[in-house]
Image (cartoon, rainbow, N blue to C red):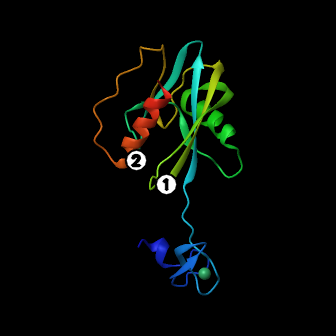
Amino acid sequence: MSTEDRFCPRCAAALVRRVEGGRERPACPACGYVAYRNPVPVALMRACDGDRLLLVRRANDPLRSFWAPPAGYVEIDETAETAAVRETAEETGFAVAVDGLAGVYAAPGTGIVLIAYRGHVTGGEAVAGEEVEEVGLFAPGRLPAQPRAHSGSPIDRWLLSVVGDLLR
Ligand SMILES: [Zn+2]
């Protein structure tokens, strides 16, 4: 167990294991806190400029140095759509408009639910954000080669398959 599973983040009492909501979870006997573990939403934007796809080469794990659509965690005060548009602006310099949902992807144990939107570029110009190495627009059938066959973590392999599905 990690530290966060041993001590209450509210009152610092030692946690116990207790059945809550149908399964055993760390819970605080002092204040009633229960450590629910749920996947976190991540928003992704599969944006086009004409027939070209907007991709970034990621600077960080997961999928470091791989090409993928811009994506990031949904903040508490925004919708998944808003997050997808914001992450695209931050990572690529391009403004985009949402056209619809591309898909929802989840795999047990990864800790995330990926909510993917389709959209199109409405303005801006390529400026690589802090979390990306490179920004590119690629015609269908002329997508950049991924850096290598991936043998990384389970979440890397799952994400790569999702990206492959989204770019098909
Ligand atoms: Zn507590």
Report the disc number at residue 111: 1
Q: Nearer the viewer, residue 36 or 86?
A: 36
Quadrant of res 46:
top right
Residue 53 in the image, given as x and y percentages of width and height: 52, 20
Q: Can residue 24 be seen in this view?
A: yes
The amino acid type of the residue labelled 1 equals Gly
Count of numbered circles on the image: 2
Labels 1 and 2: the sequence-earlier one = 1
Residue placed at 36% from the left, 48% from the top?
A: 154
- Whole-angstrom CA distance, mark 1 to mark 2, is 9 Å
Cβ atoms at labels 1 and 2 below 8 Å apart: yes
Q: Name the residue under label 2.
A: 155
Quadrant of res 34:
bottom right
Query: Vertical placement of 82 versus 98: above or below?
Result: below
Q: Residue furthest bottom?
A: 30
Residue placed at 47% from the left, 78% from the top?
A: 6
Quarter that holds the N terminus: bottom left
Q: Nearer the viewer, residue 97 or 165?
A: 165
Quadrant of res 102:
top right
Q: How crowded is mark 1: few (under 14 residues within 10 Å), some or many (20 or more)?
A: some
Residue placed at 58% from the left, 19% from the top?
A: 48
Residue 24 in the image, given as x and y percentages of width and height: 51, 76
Q: What element carries label 1?
A: loop
Residue placed at 62% from the left, 36% from the top?
A: 84
Q: In this view, does 91 lie to the left or right of 146?
A: right
Query: Vertical placement of 113 versus 119: above or below?
Result: below
Q: Is mark 2 on a helix, strand or loop?
A: helix
Tell which quarter ligand 1 is in. Answer: bottom right
Residue 160 in the image, given as x and y percentages of width and height: 40, 36
Q: Is residue 59 visible?
A: no
